[in-house]
Image: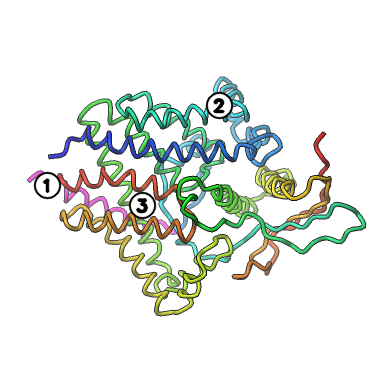
Amino acid sequence: MNSIIILLCVLLYFVLIIVFSLFKKTSQGINNPYLNLIKPLIPSWKFYDDFEETRLLFYRAKTSDSEVFSEWAPLYQNSKATFSTLFINQGNLSLAAQSHMQQLLSDIEVHDEKTPFEETLSYKITQNLVIYAIRKKYTESFTYQFKVASVDVCAKPREDIIISPLYQEGVDA
Amino acid sequence: MLDAHEVLVTIARLMGIAVMLQSLEFIKMKDSISEKGIWRWSELRVEFIFLPKPLMRFLDWIMVEKRFMEMMTIRFYTAILAFVYPHFFIIFVILFLTTFLITLRWRGSFNGGSDYLTLIILLCLCIGYLHPLLAKAALWYITLQVISSYFLAGLYKVKEQKWRMGTAVYGFVSSPNYKTPKFLIEKSKDPAFAKYMAWSVILFELTFPLVLTLPSLTTLYLAAGVVFHLVNFITFGLNRFFWVWCASYPAIYYCSKLI
């Protein structure tokens, strides 16, 4: 008897999920900041449902004025899976960067123009992502620019979504 | 009949491994949270200024690079303790709180779904250790959340035409975001193979609730789940999902025995 009740409850739970998913057309962001804090405890469990174009972060940099900018190069592509990355995967930094790109794109959509987008947290983090990656390549000061663009399967930029002005980054004292 | 407490202990040990590996990853990428790194607390704190002042003062204290890394080190050793001696309620309170702070530090999550399930399981471990009845409730909650994670993912996919046609498979595996093995990209160019893969994933996810019905199906689905997460790791590099989802499987096994 107990088993039947449990089974019925579980069945009811999944029927409710189906009914709920039929009515819920879009997932609007949560506006209450306190509820936002506990959002990770109420996951939506949407994985790979949203089939959109891939968007990547690109940069180009040069170390002197006489130099010509390099080609736009993609940043934060995940590394290849190996046995050791099953345990410790530094590529998770790339996945976190990709999650940030989703946040950036959604912030671009809802930006209200009252403040320049360059002053938003998402833009600053994007800029940090770029500086962090370029610093691993250059030890001297450099001029750089970045953009977010939709890409083809070869990671070549197709359409620019946001493109930054030129920035100068000095060497740390 | 399985004892709910013993099942919680098994989950606690597996979570110990998962959280230990997660903590090591964070420690290895510590410069990304420094004031010269990516996620700088001096910039992130603006998102929390609505909080009461004492709470804000606490965040200002704990979230700076040095202390956050000390917290990660404590989390690492606490996770080892969870594996070696998983009987202390306080271990899981520490792991839950530190994981929650990680989600705040990364504006919701560092690694998406794996952070969410880590939090849910750790919260259930905290609650489950309080009373035998709560242990059962905690195991049921983990089970329903994990089954929902597959079922809902399948439901969202089956509603997408590109998934039903199979073209989504090539779209995801060929995405420049991931370093998917070349043979898999080449193989998924074949529409028949892509459709077969797409429907295998959709059917596996949508029928996952059957895991609770028959003992033979329980074993079959849990084994398939392990393979599924290994393939996801090889394809997309999602190692954390593998450890956390596998840690939840004893709860599903326990609940299937109750039906």
Most distant residue in the front direction: A83
Residue B198: which quarter of the image? Answer: bottom left
- Give the residue drawn at x 26%, y 44%: B250
| Residue matched to label 2 | B70
Residue kind at label 2, given as amino acid type: Glu
Q: Secondary structure at mark 3?
A: helix
- Which residue was labeled with disc 1? A3
Magenta-drawn segment: A1-25
Residue type beneath disc 3 = Ser
SS at circle 2: helix
- Of residues A81 and B48, the one nearer the viewer is A81
Q: CA distance from mark 2 to mark 3?
A: 33 Å
Magenta segment: does it hold B59? no
Q: Nearer the viewer, residue B249 or B179?
A: B179
Residue receiving disc 3: B149
Label 1 to label 2: alpha-carbon separation: 47 Å
Pointer 2 indicates a residue of which chain? B
Side of B227 relative to A168 (left or right): left
